[in-house]
Image (tube, rainbow, N blue to C red):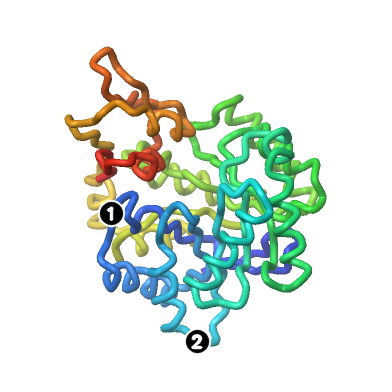
Amino acid sequence: MEYRNLGRTGIRVSRLCFGLLTIGPLQANLPLAEGVDVLKYAVEQGVNFFDTAEIYESYSYLRGMLRSFPGRELIISTKSYAVTAKEMEQSLERARRELDRDYIDIFLLHEQESALTIRGHRAALDYLLEAKKKGLVRAVGISTHRIAGVRGALELPEIDVIHPLFNIKGLGIQDGTLQEMEEVLTEAAAAGKGIYLMKALGGGNLLPQAREALDYAFSRPFAAAVAVGMKARWEVDINVLAAQGQPIPDQLEKLMGSEKRRLRIDPWCEGCGKCAEQCPQEALFLGDDGKAHVREEECLLCGYCAAACPFFYIKVY
């Protein structure tokens, strides 16, 4: 496994970052022991970087993994939608408590759209900066699906890390082209920001061309790492090989090509609209029948809508 410095943070990360969205309750909902086993297997293959978020409800998996490797430096990045200092304090303390850790390596403002939304979360950001001074956080930053979000972070020297949506087709970039996103990320990396990518496989939509998509993401010089969701040992094997630029055996290629995830909305949906409000891609809408529907070509299968549904009528499987 190759390791790179994450910008100027002083944190050294594996090229492959394990994205925990896939194993948690918003998607595969693996039993705890099974999820911990996959995470431990990834560590044994050289992965030291793990990306989660408060909304993913996956801290218990990470805690189980961390307890299996006492003394090993494993890098945890998490995210919160907190707006106020008090909300961010609660998010940070929850992460420290549930991960059984004194500090969190990287803490991000979740899904920032622009400089304007970062300003709207300024109190939460300032709390993280104070926590960094106290040694409770090593680096702070944002995640974003937008070019404007990257630009907003680029304008702030106190932002250490940017976690942007980026893939070979530009799927999910909401405010411009793939080339424009690449240009601003190159600029951000040159300014010393630590960059690690998300949605390299377009939420599963690029699985038919997975190897090409992974090779493209790992070849971007501005990216220290690429976060990929995984839920089985064979998926870890594929992504470790891709991160190293190694050939993938035919049998693993076939397994990868057979994977196809979908979003299911139960027919007894009550049409409250909370899922559509939460969807970062605006892929969900209320139809003439008063129920939620999905534009499949826009959906990145992130599962955030599932978390927003008060009745658990939405699932990614």
Which residue ends up furthest to the top in the rendered image?
288
Residue topped by disc 1: 28
For badge 1, the amino acid type reads Ala
- Assess disc 1: are there few (<14), some (14-19) or many (≥20) residues with their C-alpha within 10 Å of its C-alpha: some
Residue 7, percent from left and from top:
72, 58
- Quarter of the image that includes the C terminus: top left
Whether residue 165 is visible, yes or no, is: yes
For badge 2, the amino acid type reads Pro
Q: Which mark is residue 70?
A: 2
Up the image or down, 160 lies above or below 137; here it is above
Residue 120, percent from left and from top:
70, 38
Residue 8, percent from left and from top:
76, 61
Residue 98, percent from left and from top:
47, 71
Question: Which residue is at the front of the view, 146 or 24?
Answer: 24
Q: Secondary structure at mark 1?
A: loop
Q: How many marks?
A: 2
Question: Measuring 50% from the left and 39% from the top, which residue is drawn there?
Answer: 167
Q: Is residue 71 left or right of residue 254?
A: right
Question: Measuring 71% from the left and 42% from the top, which residue is drawn there?
Answer: 186
Question: Measuring 34% from the left and 50% from the top, which residue is drawn there?
Answer: 26
Question: Which residue is at the front of the view, 21 or 41?
Answer: 21
The image quarter containing residue 73 is bottom right
Whether residue 261 is visible, yes or no, is: no
Which residue ends up furthest to the left in the rendered image?
267
